[in-house]
Amino acid sequence: MKVRIGWICFLFCMFAAPAHSGGFEVNENAANILARSGAFTAKADHPMAIHYNPAGLLNWKGNRIYVGSNINLLSLEFERSGIDALVADGTYASATVSNEADPFFAPSIAWGYGGGDWAIGAAVYGPGAVGNRSFDAAGPQRFLMTEENFLLGYASLGGAYRITPELSMGVTAQFVTMPFAQLTTVIDANYTAGKEQSETDPWLAQAEVDMADWTGFTAIVGLHLKATSFFEVGLSSRVLPIDINATGNLNLSFPNPDTQKLLDNGSLKTVDA
């Protein structure tokens, strides 16, 4: 039997799809779901089942309410290689910078009502993520990123129906909103093509992209099968992708006060190409 199971696992690995990183999402909503590392699709006995498997809303009778929040303080360092000479000359205080952002709060509230063969639920929450990062604007990482601030939220309405005593199906419709997404980095704002750059060039500009997308829609479909008294199977999928089409403004500022003065008095203008 062990050999057969081993061959089955081997065959599954041969046909496995590529894995992708989670992006900004780093944890789960609700403490007991986080404790299970998100392995909650089959269990789904919590109001946050509206997100993990809406068919699980049938796993209790009556009302349940959940109110909670993730609090994240991201410990993140950036180290730029090959700048020992610049550090020695005083361009940077150090080749290493750390995230200086405040703790990120991500609250969530969910409600579910099970009525036997049917259930409904509603929730407002965001993904389990860290939406802020902040680095020294004069640090060695400034040409990659100095600030990031994101806020993404889901307003969800779900329902479930018991098809048979063992099989249930649920659907969650979600309104998605991203009220702001701010990215800041340092760029070369030189108007002279081919000009040799330096780390302290007065034409280095801080560029902030400020965007938003207030309206989006998605949906989650889930199945729950209670095969025996001790064996349950869950299946859940986001059947509509979250399509973010953010638009906004690009704002420039110059750390060099003389260059900033030219921008402030109108002598220097940005061009929308």
Image: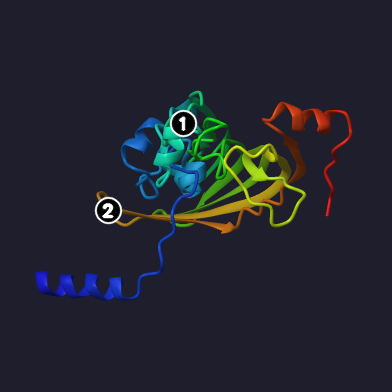
- Residue farthest along the left direction in this orientation: 2
Which amino acid type is marked by label 2?
A: Phe
Displayed quadrant of residue 11? bottom left
Q: Position of residue 76 (x, y in %)?
A: 41, 35
Displayed quadrant of residue 71? top left
For the image, the number of numbered tags is 2
What residue is shown with label 2?
A: 231
Q: Tell me if 267 is positioned left or right of 86 in this view.
A: right
* Local SS, label 2: loop
Q: Position of residue 117 (x, y in %)?
A: 50, 46
Q: Residues within 10 Å of mark 1 (few under 14, many from 20)?
A: some
Q: Nearer the viewer, mark 1 or mark 2?
A: 1
- The one of 68 and 138 positioned closer to us in this rendering: 138
Task: Give the residue displayed 84% in from the left and 50% down from the top.
Answer: 272
Quadrant where the C terminus is found in the figure: bottom right
Q: Is residue 29 visible?
A: no
Q: Tell me if 129 is positioned left or right of 84 in this view.
A: right
Q: Position of residue 254 (x, y in %)?
A: 71, 33
Cα distance, mark 1 to mark 2?
A: 45 Å
Q: Tell me if 189 is positioned left or right of 123 in this view.
A: right
Task: Give the residue displayed 40% in from the left and 46% down from the top.
Answer: 81
Q: Is residue 261 visible?
A: yes
Q: Position of residue 127 (x, y in %)?
A: 52, 40
Q: Which mark is residue 99?
A: 1
Quadrant where the N terminus is found in the figure: bottom left
Going from the N terminus, do you reach mark 1 or mark 2 first? 1
Q: Tell me if 184 is positioned left or right of 44 in this view.
A: right
